[in-house]
Amino acid sequence: MTAPFDIAPLLAPGTPAPAGKFNGFPKYNFVGGHNDAKHVPVQALIDAATAVLTREGPSLATYGLNSGPLGYKPLREFLSTKLKSHAGIECTADEILITSGSLQGLDLINTLLLAKGDTILIEQETYGGMLSRLAKFGVNIVGIPLDDDGMRMDALRAKLEELKKKGVTPKYIYTIPTVQNPTGSIMPEARRKELLALAREYKTMIFEDECYSDLIWSGERPKSLYAMANGEGVIFVGSFSKSIAPALRVGYIVAKWEILARILGLKQDAGSGALEQMILAEFCTKHFADHVPKLSKALSHKLQVLREALAEQFGTAAEFGDPPGGIYLWIKLPDVVDVPKLFTAAAAAGVALNPGPEWSTDKAYAKSRLRLCFANPEPETIRKGVEVLAEVCRREFGVPLRSANIHKR
Amino acid sequence: MTAPFDIAPLLAPGTPAPAGKFNGFPKYNFVGGHNDAKHVPVQALIDAATAVLTREGPSLATYGLNSGPLGYKPLREFLSTKLKSHAGIECTADEILITSGSLQGLDLINTLLLAKGDTILIEQETYGGMLSRLAKFGVNIVGIPLDDDGMRMDALRAKLEELKKKGVTPKYIYTIPTVQNPTGSIMPEARRKELLALAREYKTMIFEDECYSDLIWSGERPKSLYAMANGEGVIFVGSFSKSIAPALRVGYIVAKWEILARILGLKQDAGSGALEQMILAEFCTKHFADHVPKLSKALSHKLQVLREALAEQFGTAAEFGDPPGGIYLWIKLPDVVDVPKLFTAAAAAGVALNPGPEWSTDKAYAKSRLRLCFANPEPETIRKGVEVLAEVCRREFGVPLRSANIHKR
């Protein structure tokens, strides 16, 4: 028997707290980018695996297959075609880097651009995982308020001007213009033009995150910022997590080669997983165009189930919109509700939610707001979960009033 | 048309140089951890993909499947059994973290432990990718010389004592004890005991890298350091890249839960690729035990082809051993040969090699040494490549003498 060894004196300063043990997903799971289990195209993925491995299996013996460090070339070629028809982007396969999920894309771009003390601009309500990543870089995070069309250009200009007077050029403006996370808005073309002009005027870049842009009910959307700028001054990130399956860790960066070559110099992982890239490329080339509308239809149905359940259980106490796509709903509860406290009480009752303050740079503004993801739970679980959430909220904060509920029934 | 945007003013300081474009592999490719294309178990991987996706495909809709952030549980369970029988390690599935290649394992462990200015001990000849990673952390890298049994314990003790007198506790001792990279040695059990005792005495950890330990011709090996220490004061890293296929980016860390929980807190990638983990688990549970000896036999044959080709082309000018496993041979050329210069001339002739100085902390010692990987090229390519390398070396440095070559024939 060896005596225990205490690692504490050897840890690097600032190491985060240990993770807890995983005890399975909560009963009513409204968090995370999980998707609809019934719409994982299982048989088509099996067929794709069989076809691509039969044809090219031995190439697994080489790092990066025979495609080099940018990733499996047929997948980049699929993306080049898809990004053109979908987002208006004209790029070659060599202007696309396959990453291990779009999260690796965020990490690489941040590493390329950010040093401690830098300033970046970001939508005031935004992806929580980006906020926690930025905190580690020690940068000055400046939130720009949103309206129904996304980032407000008056507020952006004012902030850029204020920073300019202090001699500060922000490293980038991070935006999720197409199915904004968490608000679900789609920025109209005119505002996109304004945003591009402002970025140019103040000599900063745009970091465009399009993780959710495949999931739009109508299938219609404005051109991406990347497309409108012909790629000049914009870096674009996308993902297959939302359109195919989140457990596949396959995302991508689109950038001009001079920029991509620098990002590639930072990607020291000997390539992203080849099996996932090969199977995805084979599947997507044949089925992506048919698969996505089917998935979107299912998600749009679940959104309406969630909205109806909220209306039924919370009455007027819950305010929310009707987003045109995505997998989440952004909700305002009465000011009396402290959502971080609600989070804890709801967790004890088996309901997982994203507290607004984790998804916003303005913790006070977001205090009574929350994000609910609807893609994974089945409709009956959504209904029951919202019922449990309403009970917990009423017990803890006195809202929603019971009458509202009875009235709706 | 949008005017070009210059990203240079926005880059973080110290950003590495842009990568070059990939133009395919060199004709005679003796670098990288590539493997034998004929021994990728293609049909068995197809069968595994079909079986596991048929059974569990819909679980791809959730991040981490239903296994949590440590990785796909059946793969961790396979590893728990395999590590016991193979390396003598007693660990549960919850003491194993699946990573995106063992490179992510190296990165996570380095991030857990290292801060700028720290000191680490490492085998004088070691994995080049580890050296380049450590350089980024800004740590003080101290090389310990090797002999035929691996790291020299007299040199290690002397260095630990010297550092202690300066008040320095190294963060860890990094070792590849089982099929050392690049020398191919296997550290005997008695020396392993000494190493563990020294680490304890000087209150440092051992970072044990076992990437190549599956590929031993005899199939026999001493227990791992992790096993001998019952996991106390040791972190262990392994990989499927060498035993199955390098394009699969699947590695693992074994550590006591208190340490693994901290590493997990640093792994912010929403899990490693699920398809690769699922297919590997299904394949390995059925076929790992049969597959590895077949692959090892093929590799051992290629090693002998390389050794014979070197003897034939270089005569006594090339000194090398007969490693008991692995995919590489460490070679000493005459002192007159400047291997970094040879590298450039050989590359122009289509021969890729690892220059010794990139694989050593002692650039002068390694100046006339090189590493050749033999797993990927076919026997005829190995022979021809060595012939071309000898021609280039003769032209540039006058060795090997032509007579040695003719004499051998």
Image: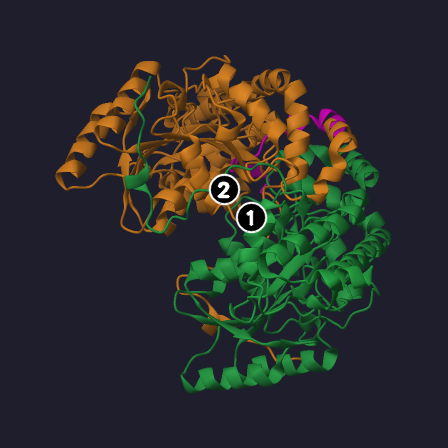
Chain colours: A green, B orange
For badge 2, the amino acid type reads: Gln
Q: Is residue B357 left or right of residue A340?
A: left
Question: Of callouts 1 and 2, which one flags the residue occurring earlier in the amino acid sequence?
Answer: 2
Marks 1 and 2, how far apart at CA? 11 Å
Q: Which residue is mark 2?
A: B104
Picture coordinates of residue B179 (x, y %)? Answer: 43, 24
The C terminus of chain A lies in quadrant = bottom right
Q: Is label 1 in a helix, a strand or a loop?
A: loop
Start-end of magenta stretch: B26-47
Was residue A205 drawn as part of the magenta stretch in this picture?
no
> Front-most of B199 and A383?
A383
Residue under the point 68% across and 46% down? A28
Q: Are the residues at dot 1 and dot 2 in contact (C-beta closer than 8 Å)?
A: yes
Q: Nearer the viewer, mark 1 or mark 2?
A: 1
Q: Which mark is residue B269?
A: 1
Q: With respect to residue A2, does A345 lie above or below? A: below
Residue under the point 33% across and 47% down? A12
Picture coordinates of residue B72 (x, y %)? Answer: 61, 33
The N terminus of chain A lies in quadrant = top left
**Label 2 marks which chain's residue?**
B
Q: Is residue B231 left or right of residue A284?
A: left
For badge 1, the amino acid type reads: Asp
Q: Which mark is residue A175?
A: none
**Label 1 marks which chain's residue?**
B
Is residue B127 among what the camera can see?
A: yes
Is residue B23 among what the camera can see?
A: no
Was residue B30 drawn as part of the magenta stretch in this picture?
yes
Q: Quadrant of residue B141?
A: top left
Picture coordinates of residue A34 (x, y %)? Answer: 69, 48
> Front-most of A37 and A278?
A37
